[in-house]
Amino acid sequence: MYLPTAFAEDRLEVKHGLIRAYPLGMLIIPGAAPTADLVPFALYPDEGEVGLGVLRAHVARANPAWRALAGGSGECLVVFQGPEAYISPGWYASKAISHKVVPTWNYAMVQARGVARVVEDAAWLRRQLGDLTAVQENGLPEPWAVSDAPPDFVNGLLKAIIGIEIPIASLVGKWKVSQNRGSADAEGVVAGLKARAAAAGSETPAPDGAAAMAALVAQRIAPDVKPG
């Protein structure tokens, strides 16, 4: 991944936070014909040998991804993408001075790499299902649990899925959120994104996560960076 120093996010808790907030990761498996599947992952931050955590997920038994992992080296990449938003050059204060500005795109992402193992153990699968749904159901008025479904129904479903466990060997974060702009330009970006989010209406979210990106830019405004 192309990663200019200004956009690198090295704090483990921040990278873990993005994975928790956006758990639907793109599982990429290399090979003669690389594959890519969107898979919801559960993060276990306190596990793993190198201190980066472990990712666990499941896929349908009919999905060839698990066979590709089992039949190869197991090496894989999981990409988690957070907020993203188009940035208009019209939001930059420096536009009125030089007009030497162009559009760009802001985004936050985490790339996790590791060697996966395939798991068919029913108890492991049952725990993974329970952990994943417990996190996602948390806060709902009437949270659903796997135990709410009939045991024979759940057992049947367990036979139709395969587990994937990835001890994270490398975890890289990239937060491209206008850190390379001066404070006036960055503040203009925040104002522009907030206006875009507000224009979308209270019931219809902005299509590109404008409000969430505005918050990320605001957190990282660097007053000593010159526009350019």
Image: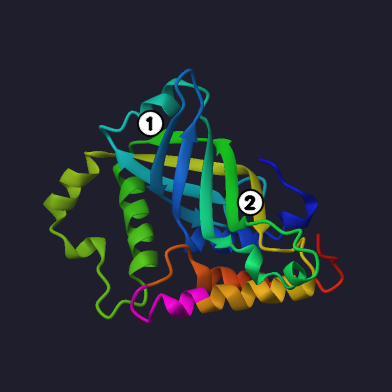
Say which residue label 2 marks: 52
- Which numbered circle lies on residue 65? 1
SS of the residue under disc 2:
loop
The answer, for residue 26, to whether it is visible in the render is yes
User: Looking at the image, how many numbered discs can be counted on the residues?
Assistant: 2
The type of residue carrying mark 1 is: Ala
| Above or below, comparing residue 134 to residue 46 in the picture | below
- Stretch of the chain drawn in magenta: 196-204
Residue 106: image location, x then y, percent: 61, 59
Instruction: Identify the mark nearer the N-term, 1 or 2.
Output: 2
Frontmost residue, 80 versus 70:
80
Q: Residue at x 30, y 51 (%)?
A: 126
Q: Residue at x 22, y 63 (%)?
A: 147
Question: Eyeballing the image, is 33 above or below 39?
Answer: above
Name the quarter where the N terminus is drawn: top right
Three-letter amino acid code of the residue under disc 2: Leu
Label 2 Cα neighbours within 10 Å, binned few <14 / some 14-19 / many ≥20: many
- The residue drawn where x is 32% and y is 54% is 129
Please give left or right for residue 186 compared with residue 146 in the image. right
Q: Nearer the viewer, mark 1 or mark 2?
A: 1
- Name the residue rendered at 33%, 47% in the picture: 125
